[in-house]
Amino acid sequence: MDWPLLFVAASSLVGLGVQHHSIKYLNGRVDSLSNTENDVASLKLQYNVLHEEMEKLQKIATKDIAGTRKLEASPFTKDAEGWWVADADMFRFPQGIVVGDRNDHCTYGEAVLAVGLLDQNGNGNCPSGDASVALGFGNTASGLHSTVTGGRFNHASGLYSSVTGGVANDATGSRSSVSGGTLNTASGWESSVSGGYHNKASGIESSVSGGYGNEATGNRASVSGGSENTALGEGSIVLGGFNNMADGMNSVITGATSNTAIGLSSISGGNNK
């Protein structure tokens, strides 16, 4: 037997087996790389889709609607002292502004302004009327376009009514006003109480300037001062004194005590009826 030739043939067969195994291994690696490339391509496609969706959402979030400022742009800058300073532009707040504490007991109107704090019982300012303003403490502006600009526990409920200050004053008539004092009421159309205590102006365009317990009940009637005076007649006037009553149309009482003017009369003083 030719042993060298047999050895060569066996070696050749072993070499062929090794080459065949290597070829299968390489084919497997090629298939694996091909699958990996496909996975990478799929991931890239998913990433591109997600990136496009995120860009769309960002554009929607920062879209400039009807000329309003984009969300990513701030209208404020902080100065060297730590104060936030607004741009020199106009600002529009359709609903309203609350500076200080929010009053949970208040139903806020539209386009309102409230400035103030709550007490320990949760009482505070309440601009419940549309386009109303409530400043001070515990004040309520419930009338349309009404304002309470100071004082405590004042109430402006009439259309275009106003209370400037004082304590527990009421402006209930349309276009009525109370400037100050305590427990005063202006209930007539375009009526006014300037001050004093417990005064009432209930006639149309009536007025009480001050004093205590005075009433102007006639249309365009007025009481300038004093105590417990009443102007009942249309266009009647009581300038002062105590317990005077101007009952007649255009009647006038200038002062003194317990006078009554009936008809087109005028009383300057004393005690007359």
Image (tube, helix red, strand yellow):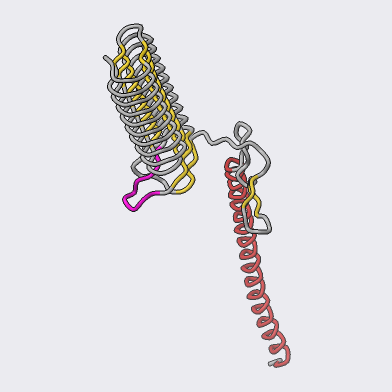
Give the residues in magenta: 118-126
Q: Residue 184: which quarter of the image?
A: top left
Q: Is residue 60 above or below residue 273?
A: below
99 and 196: which is toward the camera: 196
User: What quarter of the picture does the C terminus occupy?
Assistant: top left
Q: Residue 165, image x and y in percent?
A: 43, 37
Q: Residue at x 61, y 68 (%)?
A: 28
At 49% from the left edge and 45% from the top edge, which residue is drawn?
Answer: 99
Q: Please count the marks in the image.
A: 0
Given residues 32 and 112, the one toward you in this image is 112
Dominant secondary structure, magenta: loop
Q: Position of residue 117 (x, y in %)?
A: 42, 48
Residue 194 lies in the magenta-colored region: no
Which quadrant would the N terminus be assigned to in this image?
bottom right
Determine which quarter of the picture holds residue 108.
Answer: top left
Quadrant location of residue 66?
Answer: top right
Q: Position of residue 243 (x, y in %)?
A: 28, 24
**Position in image of residue 88 (x %, y %):** 68, 41
The residue furthest front is 270
Front-lying residue, 37 or 251: 251
Q: In the rendered structure, does residue 122 fall within the stretch colored magenta?
A: yes
| Residue 1 against residue 155 in the figure, above or below | below
Q: Spot the residue most to the top.
A: 264
